[in-house]
Amino acid sequence: MRPAMSPKRQEAGSQRDVGTVQAAAHWRFCSDHVLDGALEAGEGRVADLSGNGNHLEWVQVLGSRDVHQESGAYPCLNWIHDQERGEVLDMLNDESAAARGYFRTLASAPINQHTFEHGYTIEAIVKLPVPFDEEQHSWMGVLTRQGAGAELGRQGERELLATLSVSNCMEYQWVHHPYAAMSSATSWSRYLKDEEWHHVVIVNDTNETLLYVNGICDFACLQQDLKGIAAVPGKGWNIGASEWKGELDTLFTGRLSEIRITDRALSSTQWLTSMKPLRRLEGTNEGEVTRRSSDQYYFAFIPDPQKLVYLNPHMFNAQIEWVKQKHEELNIAMTALLGDVVDHSDAKDEWERASIAIAKLDQANIPYVMTAGNHDYDEADTYLGYFGPARFIDKAYVQGHSPSCYSSYSIMEAGSYTYLWLMADMKHLHTDLAWLRDVLNRHRALPTILISHDILYKREQPSSKSLVQSELGAVIWEELIAPYKQVFMTVNGHYDGSGYQVRANPDGHDVIQLLVNYQDSYRGGNGWLRLAEMDEEHQCIRFCTYSPWVERLALTEELEYPDYRFLIGEDHRFTIPMNFKERFNLL
């Protein structure tokens, strides 16, 4: 399948050709395009600029107070001037509003019967409420085709015929039933922020469906042959309202600027705007991953690959393939996967994709260790079936598993030292504690890296260094780090973000603690992994964040934000002094 996040880019200097696009329906939400009535008073229609007669009418949904008792103002709608978009419609459909509402196409609108069998492009320019409230604003509808798949005898998400909505995690989701398919298909964006306008674009070419936000396609629907959008006779479209089980669900709160539906797949030069995302990451495409001397070696950490395995498997494959290819050249002594190898523990295809990819390391006899994450657990212990003791039985460096079979330890030589890798399972941490302590007691002379899925998280404060122990992290520190001075590093994923801290144990020895997780960033992580360059000669560890996927992408495309081979900034590239001889003098 063509990678979803690397559609062919337009040649430099190309111009958007929006003037030649004949839309099926086009609505601009400003007062100049109100056909009649006064929306701010709770009535009126919005013109369809396409000329096809797909006008919108306002539908009022009464709230807990009588709207007529208000002073003539309609609290749900306001025309405001936005610095970026000019006049736009501000919608307040929170539960506390005196009255609420949404738009729907007129019963006579031709688009109500249109099934888009030759492809389509849907564009919506919206701004989500600030602050975004997970409870009030969860699953708000931006654009919804009325009706349910069940009315057509469809399978899958039967309550949803077609809808562009906003999840509780502030992701855009496009779910639709293709014209002739029996089940629905879903495309997602990454987790977004609420302080910027979003140009959401859904492009369907009758084969695949791609969803872009401000020019970036995070995830593609892996299904193919997605032709058209099914329609229920007699039903139309909603703007600002989703549906669930045939009834209205969460109404939209936020700002509406423009929505356009075109009955063919458009190139990016034909879109309404070339809106770019706010730059939240710093990066560079300069430099290489190299060894500065023959004595240096690397440890590689692959953070929560769940979104990659689920929706961008080629990126996870690129990570694994790179470790395989660079193992000898860079002297990658150990690779550790930090948990959440799948996004859905009940999805066999995800387990199979992850297992087949990781098998490349097995076949090449390249050492790796794994821990499970919260997404990997189920009642059937599927994780153990794929990545339990049986998978590692022929690997001499793996020395044992806990009674739960989820925790394990490995011993591997690297540079001048023999390292212990202790994988402490988060779910079975308390039941495995005695076993984990026994491993540490028997190997007090071995410098130890402890990995668990859940140790540190990032405090929601401006300080990028503000890391806090989780509940399980506190147990790990008290039981598995403080009494054992050989533990010099911990690594975890699970929580959104990346950061590090150096903390002294009770003996005064430094413990490096890393939080590494990019699953909530662009494209589920964009293939970024964390490398630790162990430099005994210069007494330091250099950490960098690198994407083998972007390296591969650069062979065929000109790289644009956020396609950085290396992330930079203090949370992604840093050096920590390490006097190896002094720190590892453990006897």
Image: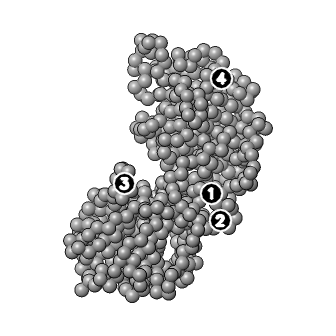
Name the amino acid, label 3: Ser
Disc 4 packing (10 Å; few <14; some 14–19; many ≥20)? some
Q: Nearer the viewer, residue 252 or 107?
A: 252
Element type at marker 2? loop
Q: Quote the CA–CA distance across marks 1 and 3.
A: 28 Å
Name the amino acid, label 4: His
**Contact, CB < 8 Å: mark 1 with mark 3?**
no
Task: Give the quarter of the image for residue 21.
Answer: top right
Above or below 30: residue 475: below
Numbered label attached to residue 560: 1
Residue 370 visible, this orientation? no
Numbered label attached to residue 33: 4
**Contact, CB < 8 Å: mark 2 with mark 4?**
no
Residue 468 x, y percent position in the rendering = 31, 57
Name the amino acid, label 2: Ala
Residue 577 x, y percent position in the rendering = 36, 75
Q: Earlier in the sequence, mark 2 or mark 4?
A: 4
Q: Nearer the viewer, residue 561 or 344?
A: 561
Name the amino acid, label 1: Glu
State the quadrant of the N terminus.
bottom right
Residue to which mark 2 is pinned: 554
Q: Earlier in the sequence, mark 3 or mark 4?
A: 4
**Contact, CB < 8 Å: mark 3 with mark 2?**
no
Element type at marker 1? loop
Q: Nearer the viewer, residue 500 or 38?
A: 500
Q: Nearer the viewer, mark 3 or mark 2?
A: 3
Element type at marker 3? loop
Residue occupying image coordinates x 59% and y 59%: 563
Q: Earlier in the sequence, mark 2 or mark 1?
A: 2
